[in-house]
Amino acid sequence: MRRVAIIGVGMSKFGEVWERGFRELVAEAGLRAIEDAKVQGEEIDALFGGTMAAGRLIGQEHIAALIADYMGINPTAATRVEDACASGGVALRTGMMAVASGLHDMVVVGGVEKMTDVAVGDATSALGGAGDQEWELFMGATFPSLYAFIAQRHMKDYGTTEEQMAAVAVKNHANASKNKYAQYQNEITIEQVMKSKVIASPLKLFDCSPITDGAAAVVLCPLDKAKKYTDTPIEIIGTGQASDTIALHSRESFTTLKATKIAAKKAYDMAKVGPKDIKVAEVHDCFTIAELLAIEDLGFFKKGEGGKATANGETALNSKISINTSGGLKGCGHPVGATGVKQAVEIAWQLRGDAGARQVSGAEYGLTQNVGGSGATAVVHIYKRAD
Amino acid sequence: MWRRIPERYRMAGSLCENCRQNFFPRRTFCPICRRKGKIVDKQMSGKGKVFAYSLVTAPPVGYEGEIPYILAIIELDEGPKVTAQIVDCKCDKLEIGTKVKSAFRRITEDGDEGIIYYGFKFKLDK
Ligand SMILES: [Zn+2]
């Protein structure tokens, strides 16, 4: 198996981008990544595109071919990857496999979602497709309500409080305010989160990631060729992916995402590092409670102690471990299929020292964790600067 | 939709005679025993207790007329957990562990064709 490096990254400004369409967003992110990698379009021999619900949200399928077309990299092997909100992270893993196997030499991984062309209720229903259509959605479940169940159990079993969950949103907005690509550029307070409208108790509007348009892309090649293109290749040294039951109610425990734990173990084992080696991580905070589960399941904090640690500032920028320096899904935005790729873009910037005002100091390794649905898919990657 | 009528109308589930695990909704294959499993029909009693609940105020398409509604995860006496609404009840009457039983109700309506879908909701089991 060949070692794989990221040699270029790019993303569009995340947000409600009503004046630009799906194809403008992917072209922008993809071209930035290709420019960053200093490769020629004709060198790219494969593209993996992560998107969750383009069919429901913009009526467009066959999006990998469309992305290749609008990035001007035809003819190439263009393939769509869909694993709900983990589509981007799984596209990255698929691209990595393509390069590691030796089948492809220069691969673009893109992620995109254009979500604000439909009404909020339609977007809620489209995203609901990540759950069990017949036994969750039909009963009136929404993603906020599924994560509300997780939050309620975490509160009951470990004494986690609504204020501790609010601290996740406050921290992620603070990070987002230092990221020009983020949907939100404003800081918020615990009080604002606590006073925001209830969506599915105990979760309130500011516990939820927003509806976002955006795209992100990375360029991958074999590590031994990476130095030809960049002085600072970022090697992907570990990858892991796991599945779990599609319905939340079929799981024994609600307070751990087993798929995250298994994916993380595989990634740590492959990378030969452990949670203590990680100083910067992008985790899947689709809801504030999801970040608490993530930092526990990834081994950064003991089970049940994520809320307290967050409220104590232990996950803030340049603290014990910097979590979601991009602003996370909450602050940077959550264009579903783009999120997993954006996480890799942020970690590449951090490890290269290109993260500006939100730069983490002294991070040798970085990690990303991307979740599909309520945890039926999880994918974890570990990165290291390889110069 | 019609395929699910036995499960949605009377909570028909499955039992694996090999591992004695009950399943709801029905399974044709035991995910625990795999090829060694032996699946037979098993009727759920419709009784259980609240495992988690939430007051939903932001509905998906088709549930706009229902809000706010209480959505819950119910742990059935037979073991499986299900997601369903709790009706005829206020949130402050509920806690984790509250006993509930199933009731046959209208779930939603298809806006375009006006088809009404029925299924189970839960109410307090006093
Ligand atoms: Zn069995």
Image (cartoon, grey):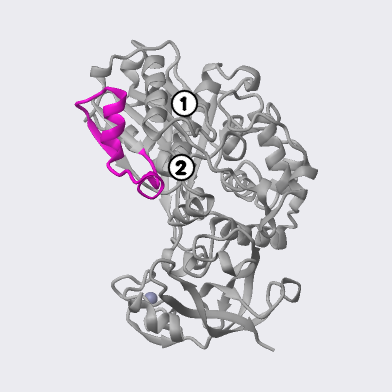
Cα distance in 3D space between marks 1 and 2: 20 Å
The type of residue carrying mark 2 is Asp
- The reply, left or right, for residue A245 in relation to residue B87 is left
Asked if the stretch drawn in magenta spans residue A72, the answer is yes
Measuring from the top left, give residue B125's x and y in whole percent: 66, 87
**Tag 1: residue type?**
Met
Q: Position of residue A337 (x, y in %)?
A: 43, 41
Q: Secondary structure at mark 2?
A: loop
User: Looking at mark 2, is its residue's CB closer than 8 Å to ligand 1?
Assistant: no
**Residue A218 visible (yes or no):** yes
- Say which of marks 1 and 2 sits in front: 2
Q: Which residues are magenta?
A: A50-79
Q: Where is residue A151 shown, x and y percent of the image?
A: 65, 57
Report the front residue among B84 and A17.
Answer: A17
The quadrant where ligand 1 appears is: bottom left
At horizontal 57% and vertical 61% (from top left) the residue drawn is: B59
Residue identified by numbered label 1: A11
Which chain's residue wears label 1?
A
Is residue B24 at all visible to an observer of this figure? no
Could you say which is closer to the camera, residue A79 or residue B20?
A: A79
Q: Which residue is mark 2?
A: A117
Sort mark 1 into few (<14), some (14-19) or many (20+) by Cα contacts within 10 Å. Answer: many
